[in-house]
Image (spheres, rainbow, N blue to C red):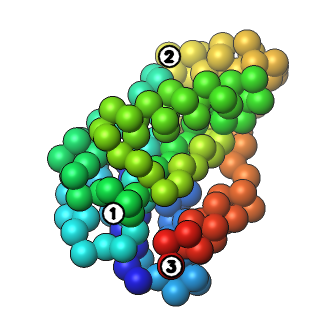
Amino acid sequence: MKALVAYSSNTGVTAEIAERIGEVLSSEGFTVVLSDLKKENPNPEGYDLVLVGSGIKMGQWIKESKQFLAVNHQMLHGKTALFVSCGDAAVPKKKANAQTKYLDAVAEMYSIEPVSTGLFAGCFKWNKYNFFVKQLVKGILKEDGVIGVNTSEPLDYRDWTRIETWARELAGKVR
């Protein structure tokens, strides 16, 4: 079986998640193609499974992932999974809203019925942010109860076991 893992990433966090998902799918017997939507525009035809992922920037999917869904949504029925990496996924009181806003609403917007959705906590790579973005993110984290953030090192909330389990379960669903 063939799987396309197409994603957009601003700081590399979603790219790392996509790579890990690809590794798991490969170990489950899939032939996997990873595609950075900022660099290429793959054709989803001929794949048994198409995963489309995005980081969340200012409360929105990254434009290249949205464009991919807009152009290809008719070819994606019955074989698509959506995933995002975002800070809200790490905050229990924000998870349900993040699922609705970043996955369910996007699927509805593009008339896609995904076989699965993955809401994954992200990683704040401070060295990728300018001063303004650092202050904005620190303010949001403070509202969420995270105080005294050390911006000299990434603040990583990713749960790799959860990501790998999701990918394995997804592989089982489409076989």
Q: Which residue is mark 2?
A: 132
Image location (x, y in percent) of residue 94: 68, 24
Q: Which residue is mark 1?
A: 35
Name the residue type under label 3: Arg
Image location (x, y in percent) of residue 53: 44, 50
Disc 1 crowd, CA 10 A, few/some/many (<14, 14-19, 20+): some
Q: Is residue 88 above or below residue 28?
A: above
- Could you tell me which secondary element the residue under label 2 belongs to? helix
Name the residue type under label 1: Ser
Judge by depth and name the residue closer to the eye, 164 or 152.
164
Q: Report, in whole angstroms, how far the alpha carbon at label 2 lies from the one at label 1.
A: 30 Å
Q: Is residue 71 above or below residue 16?
A: above
| Residue 136 in sight | yes
Mark 2 vs mark 3: give the one in front: 3
Image location (x, y in percent) of residue 72: 21, 52
Q: Is residue 113 above or below residue 161?
A: above
At x 43%, y 44%, the residue is 54
| Residue 36 in sight | no
- Horizontal relation, residue 53 to residue 119: left or right: left
Q: Which residue is mark 3?
A: 175
